[in-house]
Amino acid sequence: MKETLPDSFAEHLRELAPQVLGAVVRRFRDFAAAEDALQEAMLAAFTQWPKQGVPENPRGWLIQVASRRMTDQVRSEIARRERENSVARDIDTMVLADEIEPDMDMDPNDTLILLFMCCHPALNSSSTIALTLRAVGGLTTAEIANAFLVPEATMAQRISRAKQSIKASGVSFSLLPPQDRAERLPAVLHVLYLIFNEGYTSSIGAHLQRLDLAREAIRLTRCAKHLLPDDAEVAGLLALMLLTDARRAARTGPDEELIPLDKQDRSLWDRTEISEGIEFLTAALSKGSVGLYQLQAAIAAVHDETARAEDTDWPQILALYELLKRVSPSPMVTLNHAIATAMVHGPSKGLELLKPLESDNRLAEHHRLNAVRAHLLEMLGDHETAVRHYRIAASRTTSIPEQNYLMAQAARLEESPNCPEENTTTPDHVHEPIQSKMT
């Protein structure tokens, strides 16, 4: 045993979790029971490693512990069946913990299989996200409950139902055929993007950003990129996350207040993440096909490569949004296209493009529509109406920093109606999907 724990103890365990779960599911063919066994193994690690030191082979240690739990469970089940004079028909599938050691090497596809399994069509969006964070991300039920802002018991029930749905579906623990995998990949990427967005701009609560969720989404997407290195959209999504996350340090002030894009100190932007994101994006675009995430990454790159907000190449951004509207139309794309249009052709043109969204039930009551309308009205000089929409937007968001920001904009216009600040861009409304709330 080593004498000291690694610095990133919890993070290290999270990285190991999907590898261990994959190995145990492959052997025992029971996702729900294997997931429970993994949690027991993780708990044992949290309890024992700080006292005894990290094992030389931590992954093997976790597999052994989880497998013993599974073995005990299988033995208990067999004993029960014997007492009931039933035949233990599943005994051939039982693998004793002692037999694990010779086959300890991880199948590199295990994490990918888990990711696709958690995004099974039988599950709804919230269950998919919760199960992905638990099974692939290695987060505890309490951590996920905290992310969703629901009681731990509620989250435990949600995860339990999701596992039962997976079990009832009869899906085997194996890589999907290429065609099925291609069909489900957009759902997998969408889930990863939702997790990232909730981390980048939390939809509820006192904090604008959830660093743990954003980092986890990037880590999982890196994993997907490693497993599917030739997929341009996986690379595009990773590039988009990195190029967006690069602005994280500049997005909030000392009191957690929201700082809009045009007011951010760009010297705080993470140049390493920007360089890496652009590298992934360039490689993805060279593959020929251009998809939803590559285009959004390209828009993010235009912002990131601009030294001053006033130098932003809005015509290029507008052209990219027009292409995005053709490739992947959605209300949020329409909203952002309206913003880019306003920045190039004036606020009146942008406001015209917002009108169809007023009857779109996916966005009509969303605070971002009112926030953007308020912003464009302010640009147009209609401050009284802008104040009203800023206040409506503030009343509709459950994010305290966003609420404070919008109320501050309304108060600023009311206090100095003839001398508003120069408003050159939007308060960070770009690049967020309409389904950004995880609950």
Image (cartoon, rainbow, N blue to C red):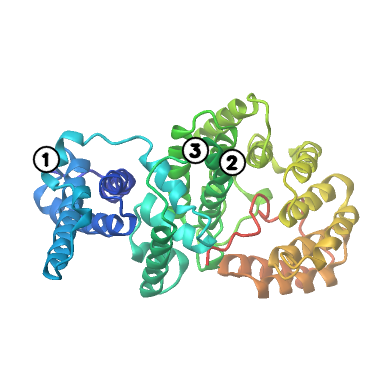
Determine crowd level at label 2: few under 14, some 14-19, many 20+ residues with C-alpha closer than 10 A. many
What residue did someone put label 3 on?
177
Residue occupying image coordinates x 21% and y 46%:
63
Secondary structure at numbered mark 3: loop
Give the residue type that dot 3 points to: Pro
Nearer-N-terminus badge (1/2): 1
Determine crowd level at label 1: few under 14, some 14-19, many 20+ residues with C-alpha closer than 10 A. few
Q: Give the alpha-carbon distance from disc 1 to disc 2, as whole Å.
A: 39 Å
Give the residue type that dot 1 points to: Lys
Q: Is residue 277 left or right of residue 80?
A: right
What residue did someone put label 1 on?
2
Give the residue type that dot 2 points to: Leu
Residue 88: horizontal and vertical position, in percent?
A: 18, 58
Q: Is residue 279 left or right of residue 163?
A: right
Residue occupying image coordinates x 56% and y 30%:
280
For the residues bearing labels 1 and 3, Cβ distance under 8 angstroms: no
Secondary structure at numbered mark 1: loop
Total marks shown come to: 3
Q: Give the alpha-carbon distance from disc 1 to disc 3, as whole Å.
A: 42 Å
What residue did someone put label 2 on?
240
Residue 382: horizontal and vertical position, in percent?
A: 87, 66
Residue 313: horizontal and vertical position, in percent?
A: 76, 37
Secondary structure at numbered mark 2: helix
